Amino acid sequence: MNVGFLYSQIRADEKLLLTELRSRGHDILKIDVRKHQFSIQGPSSEFKDLDIVIDRCIAQSQSKFASLFFASYGIPIINDPIVVERCSDKVKTSLLLANAGIPTPETTIAFSPESALETIETMGYPCVIKPIVGSWGRLMAKIDTRAAAEAIIEHKATLGHYEHKIFYIQKFINKPNRDIRVVAVDGNAIAAMTRTSTHWLTNAAKGATVDAYDMPNEVASLVEQASKVVGGGLLGVDLMELDDGGFTVHEINPGTEFKALNECVDVNVPSHIINWIESVANKKGETR
């Protein structure tokens, strides 16, 4: 298989995938997105023989546009640009989940500081305000009081970028100091872990402790449903446990990291990922 490997930085996750690809004898073209150009006239000669491209760009903006170009060239890319667009935008993800009847936190969007404050007061404290695009828990805030709400809204309103003037406000979920990350391919879970922290943010990037998680059928079913509504692909689906039982899906990640998961489970995560990518390439090859 001729594999294009699109990246902006080679981290531990990318090294795991590259090692697995090389161990299987695949030819790899490493494509540093910072050094290549992509033309609407068609692919450069080095791209034409690629069977599939794996997108591992860190910036979601790079993934969004680079994936569009490879799809336009007729070269399969993981993930599909439609999936990247849906999952990179928290508003689109929330709407898709809610419209499909998949449990997800109560969410309201406001477009002015005054409307945002009114939304927060109506929703009640605590609540959470998030950027509509972003990962690793950056620029997220738990709001406990009106004074905090006023300060955070003022800061967002003056940050300059238009996305900060879209106020994505979510009901705070009183989870048991942990959330659940499931890595899945086309809705089929590979493995899962819990991320535990005394901080309300339980991202591994924020220092949370990770442990293997034995998924109940309910979680596996929600992961399958959530994957389906965004279009499938290689995804990290994040869930929280509810006080009264059950689970809620709060985020779907299109460029999911899996190093921490791979270290805490008995499953070879990169091997399962490459197995699936090989099957996607074979199916695409039969129809090209």
Image: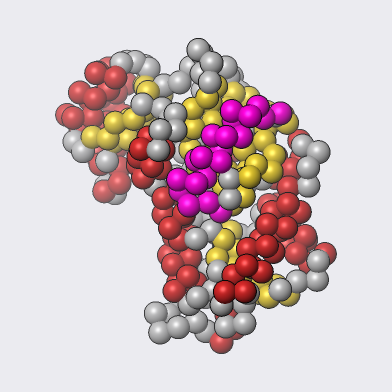
**Which residues are drawn in magenta?**
214-233
Residue appearing at x 71%, y 58% in the figure: 274
Residue appearing at x 56%, y 41% in the figure: 224
Front residue of 134/94: it is 94
Q: Quadrant of residue 236?
A: top right
Residue 46 falls left or right of residue 230: right
Residue 87 falls left or right of residue 204: left
* Position in image of residue 34 (x %, y %): 52, 68
Residue appearing at x 44%, y 74% in the figure: 72
* Position in image of residue 54 (x %, y %): 60, 63
Q: In which quarter of the image is residue 94?
A: top left
Residue appearing at x 45%, y 45% in the figure: 229
SS majority, magenta:
helix
Q: Can residue 217 be seen in this view?
A: yes
Residue 9 falls left or right of residue 251: right
For the view shown, which residue lies furthest in the top direction? Answer: 244
* Position in image of residue 270 (x %, y %): 73, 52
Does 229 lie within the magenta span? yes
Q: Is residue 4 visible?
A: no
Compared to residue 7, the image places residue 184 above or below, namely above
Q: In which quarter of the image is the N terminus?
A: bottom right
What colour scheme was applied to this rendering of the protein? secondary structure
Number of numbered discs visible in the structure rendering: 0
Does 209 lie within the magenta span? no
* Position in image of residue 71 (x %, y %): 47, 70
Q: In which quarter of the image is the C terminus?
A: bottom right
Compared to residue 146, the image places residue 28 above or below, namely below
For the view shown, which residue lies furthest in the front direction? Answer: 287
